[in-house]
Image (spheres, rainbow, N blue to C red):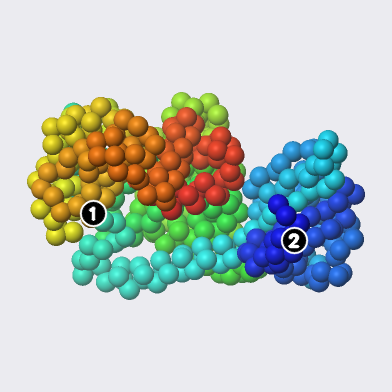
Amino acid sequence: MKEKYYDAIINILDYIDEGIQIVDEKGRIVYYNKAARVHDGIEDEEAIGRHILEIYPSLTFDTSTILKSMQTLTSIMNKEQEFVNYKGDKISTINSSLPIRSGKKIIGAIEISKNITTVRELSEKIVDLQSELYKPKFKNKKKKDKNNGTSFTFVDIIGQNKEMLKLKTLAFKASQTDSPVLIGGSTGTGKELFVHSIHNSSTRKDSPFIAQNCAALPANLLESILFGSVKGSFTGANDRPGLFELADGGTLFLDEINSMPLELQAKLLRVLQDKKIRRVGGAKTIDVDVRIVAAYNSNLKDILEKKELRRDLFYRLNVISMTVPDLKDRKDDLPILLDFFIEKHNKKNNKFIKEVSTEVMEIFMKYEWPGNVRELEHVIEGISSIYDIDIIREEHLPYHFTENNLGINTSNGKIEPLNKALERKEKELILTALNKTDGNVSRAAELLEIPRQTLQYRIKKLDI
Ligand SMILES: Nc1ncnc2c1ncn2[C@@H]1O[C@H](COP(=O)(O)OP(=O)(O)O)[C@@H](O)[C@H]1O
Ligand SMILES: [Mg+2]
């Protein structure tokens, strides 16, 4: 890059939300952007040239991620760090640190840190909103309101495949009990549909259904979101209920359970056994009556072997166990799924699509459907919103269904818009990485060489 642009780059760094700091090979601060100055409670002039441990007396050579990355010559990604800043405030951040090399020599390290106090505040706001949402509704239990936080029942699960019929029967039976359910299956296979349906067929249907993805939040935060907190237990902590209390009488769905940190899994196990929770920092135990449904989207054997899920918790959750098959293993359901989605999006978009051509059906039957039913729906949704046609033919399919993968449709020579092509490629790479790691987001992020949180964000954004 031309040197004349350096100033502009340095200036722009003051406008981003992540804190950035650079230290030299001795650990002395060389650069601080605005966000870092704010969460560290320090002025630029005070910090430059001083040693990092001088600025953060609560850190050590061992706990400072930026010093550690320099000492071990490795990048440290997405590590949670708690420290007391210069003003004496307790701060939680998520840091990624990289050593800086000049040739073979290490000349310092750079750190990007996200202040998760905001994430914490937002997550807590969501809990507050959920509790507001449920309060009035469930006080008056006579007035039946189907809107309990779910949108699906068993009739919405399309599938006549033998395995699917068995699963629906099993899930219905499960709904008539209070036992925990453990449900596996790749992304987009319809796990959530099953979970909603179980809740809606159960005696708990007029009580809340609450879902939490265990991979979406850092460990400490997940703990206080699930179990609640007591004022003063950590910086900014207030008395607030967790999801267990909010879901009282209803169902709590823990998605990607294998991403839950192991200590928290131990705590969850105790809650399942005792049916009591204790808020973070609290002394009082609170009785909760919650039905737990947990899901994972990798290979169960791997999860257990890699110790992502504690065995004792696994036995406790696995009272009723089901695995939703991949779409590629139940292609006999493709025709009814197609009919269903065509009809659904005809209605939505006011279109009159009747069917897919024989050639398209052949292509679909051969295709692997890595994104499963969700991917199938997106394909139909996309076509339905763009074209006014009555039959879906090859030329209407997204580019990756035709043989070449270059963004050039082989049947009509049309070139795919660049944005679309890039997005498609990104989706493809992410799905491939997820398939390779059996759905393990952390390991997929390593394969793609991006931070886990970034991958998580992209998965959400691209609706994978
Ligand atoms: N059997 C099915 N019948 C109808 N729609 C389905 C089915 N399976 C999946 N879908 C559609 O795919 C989407 C993704 O399903 P979801 O349950 O969220 O997948 P998962 O939780 O396994 O990743 C759903 O919102 C729904 O629109
Ligand atoms: Mg899901």
Q: Is residue 77 visible?
A: yes
Query: Is ligand 1 within 8 Å of the beta carbon of the residue shown at mark 2?
Result: no
Q: Residues within 10 Å of mark 1 (few under 14, many from 20)?
A: few
Residue 177 coordinates in the image, percent (x, y): 28, 44
Question: At label 2, which amino acid type do we have?
Answer: Lys
Q: Is residue 376 visible?
A: no
Position of residue 332 relative to residue 224, above or below, is: above
Q: Nearer the viewer, residue 169 or 386?
A: 386
**Residue visible at 30% across and 70% down?**
137
Q: Nearer the viewer, residue 196 or 440?
A: 440
Q: Secondary structure at mark 1?
A: helix
Position of residue 144 relative to residue 437, above or below, is: below
Residue 440 coordinates in the image, percent (x, y): 50, 36
Name the residue that disc number 1 marks: 386
Q: Quadrant of residue 322?
A: top left
Name the residue that disc number 2 marks: 4
Q: Secondary structure at mark 2?
A: helix
In the image, taking residue 11 as reference, residue 22 lies left or right, namely right
**Residue visible at 14% across and 39% down?**
356
Q: Nearer the viewer, residue 62 or 415?
A: 415
Q: Nearer the viewer, mark 1 or mark 2?
A: 2
Q: Quadrant of residue 280?
A: bottom right
